[in-house]
Image: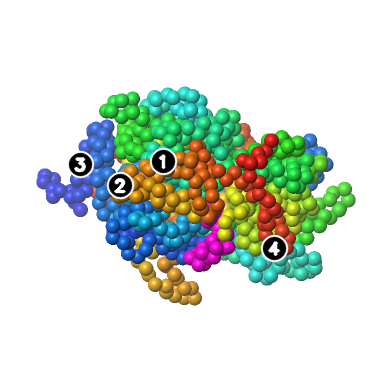
Amino acid sequence: MRLRNLSVLATAALLVASACNSSGATPAPATTGPGASTVASAPASAPAGNVAVKIGIELPLTGGEAPNGQPTANGVALAISKLTVPGFTITIEQKDDALNGHHDPPTGAANVTALANDPAVLFVVGPYNSNVAQAEIPVSNAAGLMQCSPANTNPGLTKTWGGVDPKTLRPTHPDQIAYVRVATTDDLQGAGGADIAYNVAHAKNAYVVDDTETYGKGLADVFATDFAKLGGTVLKRDGIPTSTTDFTSYITALKGLTGLDYVYYGGVTTSGIGVFRSQMAAQSMASIPFGVGDGAVDGSAATASSFLNLAGADGDANTYGTVAATHDIPNPAQFTTDYKAMFNTEPGSYSAAGYGCTQVFLQALQAVGPADGSDLVKLRADIRAYVADSSHSYDTALGTFSFDAAGDTSQHIISYYGFDAGTKDWKFLQQRDFTANPMQ
Amino acid sequence: MSVLSMASTRRSLPNIPWRTVGGMAIALVVAYLVILNASGPQAQEQFINALTTGALYALIALGYTMVYGIIELINFAHGEIFMCGSFVAYLLITTFGFSGAITDLPLLAGVLFVVFLVSMLSMGVVGVIIERFAYRPLRNAPRLAPLITAIGVSFILQNIVFVGISNSVVSVPKLIPFTILNLGPVSIREINLVVIVLAIVLMVGLQLFTTRTRLGTAMRSTALDREAAQLMGVDINRTIAITFFIGAALAGAAGVVQTQYLGVTHFRIGFQDGLFAFTAAVLGGIGNTTGAAVGAFVIGFLQVISSAYGYGRWNEAIIFATLVLVLIFRPTGILGQQLAERA
Amino acid sequence: MTAATGSKPLRPRDVVIQVRDIFDRHQSLTIVIGAIAVIFILPFVATLPPFNGFGKQNDWINTFADAGVFVLLASGLNVVVGLAGLLDLGYAAFFAIGAYTYAYGASSFTGLHIPFWIMLFVGAGVAATFGLLLGAPTLRLRGDYLAIVTLGFGEIVPVVILNSDQLTRGTNGITGINQPDLYGILGINSFGFQSPFLYFVTVVAIVTVAFILLYRLQDSRIGRAWVAVREDELAAASMGINTVTTKLLAFSIGATTSGLGGAFYASKLGIVSPDQFDFTVSFTVLAMVVLGGMGNTWGVAAGAFIIFEIQHQGLKTLGDFVQSLHIPTFALGPLTVDLSTFNFLNYQYLLYGLALVLMMLIRPEGLFPSRRRRRELHAEGDEVAELLSAETLEPT
């Protein structure tokens, strides 16, 4: 009996976190992903007299989501290591919103609460997923802590969408924003997809399908509306649950759509879009162009488990993708070189966005820092006010932009990509600035 | 269907349950008509899709139902064995260096044979190991304990693959050419034919094994009444181990089928497909191997019909709602269960 | 050990028996005192090492409030699985119903802003009704058929919510859900998003009320009927117990706490969406019940709390700890093990699975089993002697 009790305790000990934890506020090393190395986020010895402040990271860093969040976090770390603001020593406070390998809104909310409770945290980069943002915006709004998302594209976070006013996400201070994003929104990305379908691929009849998740469905809905507005016809509108691996019945059904000349699939690669395309190709339908959003523009055909890789050589032909960001970032080669020097791997899709968000913070800190000195409360509030002020613009790795009153970036640019059989990768076709050139 | 009719092992003709077969035939015709209504010219292809999907689920469902029949355990780890089987196939095929269809028939047959053999044997062994260390000690524990353990084992298997092989969707080269065979009025792809025939062969083989061999009889008797079987000299531990072996081997075969038919695998497919397969087993009547097959085909057809009619997004709800409805009117499944009656 | 009459030395066992007696006689009071103690003790413990290394007190209190939701869920599932013996694998469906009920009653989506405190009752009522609705089809099913049907419901409900865009906003979920509001009492209006302590106290209060009711039910005819049905349905029926109403009540009352938990969860988070209520949630609550100690309400609550904290804090800090040790790489047979980049979170499922398997092998009755269960599984020599020598018969 004693032995059994001891074993129980031993089991419990296996479960319970160990007693000595010294990490506290120092950043956890970035340890997932290929060739990852530790994040150095602060100079070894802080010059005396500097105010110690922190930038928070709130991203999914583990499990299946690590390929999304980790490179983005690395972008932040790169920025902090390269850029400084006189008078301040900046460290990173990193939080992970993945629970059991999947992004989890309540965990995200708890993380932002914890970051907000730390007076030294003046700014948060994150989150990556739009539904996590829905849980976090009320918290950061209540705390007056500015968040910059590198990747959220759901329009409802900042604009009225589906009849819902974004102020419902800000019950504490409805007229103050504490959330901005450098990625532009899916209403533009879906329009871009429709633009490609109608004007680049010259399609008239489309099959529109989504993976029943927020991002995919939103994108597909916008595509369907805008494609019809341009003059096309949506032959069929479908939703395939993300857990599906057997698309054969859907592919067979495609054959019944007469005149089909475009397929648009809104969703992320892990929902099986690549598999769908490969099965299309297997059924001799690779000649029908296939359009995706940035959830599937995730690497070349050589990148393991990317959309192009899973679609197979036959399926890759005639594919188009959109990315909710400008292609023409100033000096991409330099960024790649710097990133590789620090992390030994290629930058991810949102590394530059993470870098850009950090630059927004640093520029705001530079502007309000001197006046506020070491008053952390005032610093946080003033940074929030500074970034929320739409008259300010930022010079970043993503180019120069400002935020509008709702928190959206002024870069309303969607980049169009097509598959290039030579490089077996996405090739930039063109980009469209939807402010200057809106969809009719 | 009834216990007594399955008890004999020395009949010269297999005892075909004509009512079941007749019912199935009528159901197939009805299903075809339903599909025809939605799909028109693609109806034949969709029908074959349904049969193939059903065959895949049947291979997994058999393992569930056999294990449940013999020790009344919902083996949640079974779906992960299917998933591991598919990864074994993936590793073998990529190690051999194949990257596409093999047109040389003897070579194709040889490679497939090896892949199936290795996958089935290795998964069988894994199944036996799991039973030995995770379930056997809990044979007399309250019912929930092995259930929790089973889920724990499924987490472990998922994580091993997640960390050891890939944390995302993995593409597997399809070795069987995608050519269409025209057999009279029916045109069917090679791969579909292979899957369906394979499933039927394995199921018939299983049925023959359980009805014609001593080991099979031992399995059935252990399922009926463990104590009485022991008194009759059946080695319970060995019999249960063999049951797990066979069930896991079938799941391993299903894993290979998954890679060859669908060309992908993922560390999470065990959960989803396992859930449907277990639903199939319950639908048909848990403990009843014919029932598991019937249930699997029902689910395959439901999936195809729902997507043909444009209700693909309601797929899971439709399947489970069907399960609930069937169980309300037939609480022991379509073909009834084959379990010992507990006091 | 032989019993001695007159004065005996006070053994720990006697103290435990005395405490149990006091508890049994003054149940509700004990629960309330326990709740008050928790409100003071837990935040205090959060300031002590090692816990203060993992986060600030306020962050801990925030997770305590979040854990409270699962304590409620686990207590409810305990009624279904632990007391009545009905294997329910789809409890997340009730959680979803509870959360969405609150979202309908108190958000900008419907325009209704019914106060949180009233919605608690409404939510409990709606959940209880669904408990009846979802329990009804299962009445004729035995054992594992019941399990798979409940699993089916657990899958159907989120899918229906996901696809009913008009009613539920589908995958986008419902936002702008109201927080609890005291309307000026004690100077507090809306709880907002910066007062974890208010949420913590509220959830402890809800748990207290729920526990008082659950313990009363456990001791009542219904409670005994549940245990009877769990142990042997046929015998129970022949003793005159209406198994139909007993089982329906189990589902219904078990679902009630999910209505409470769902309301609290939705109000604290401010949003609900269907992907928060999948099978992992059902399984987590079931694991909490089994690992906590099926049939034992406070055991299940403790189990829920512990597992929740481990899931949300444990592995991350374990990973940080191992990394901070800076163990150099070493060789383990043909493999080189490099612990400095070893990310425990990648192995989280493995560790969780191992822990589940080990727990079931070593202690299948759970950490804090009910007295009946412990006797069933570990009929130890001296316990039996105890019983024989006890002066009073212990209640079960």
Label disc, if present, on residue A423 of the rendered structure: 4
Lower position in the chain sequence, tag 1 or tag 4: 1
Instruction: Name the amino acid type tagged 1.
Output: Ala
Would you say residue A160 is visible in this rendering? yes
**Residue C29 x %, y %:** 24, 32
Label disc, if present, on residue C26 of the rendered structure: none
User: Which residue position holds label 3?
Assistant: C18
Distance between the Cα atoms at labels 1 and 3?
Answer: 62 Å
For the point 37% across and 70% down, the residue is C327
The label nearer to you, 4 versus 2, is 2
Q: Which residues are magenta?
A: A332-353
Subunit of mark 2? A
What secondary structure do most residues of the magenta stretch adopt? helix
Instruction: Name the amino acid type tagged 3.
Output: Gln
Q: Magenta segment: does it hold A34? A: no
Left or right: residue C42 versus residue B184 is: left
The residue lying toward the viewer, choosing from B221 and A11, is: A11
Asked if badge 3 and badge 2 are on a common chain, one would say no
Asked if badge 1 and badge 3 are on a common chain, one would say no
Secondary element type, mark 4 = loop
Residues packed near mark 4 inside 10 Å, few (<14), some (14 to 19) or many (20 plus): few
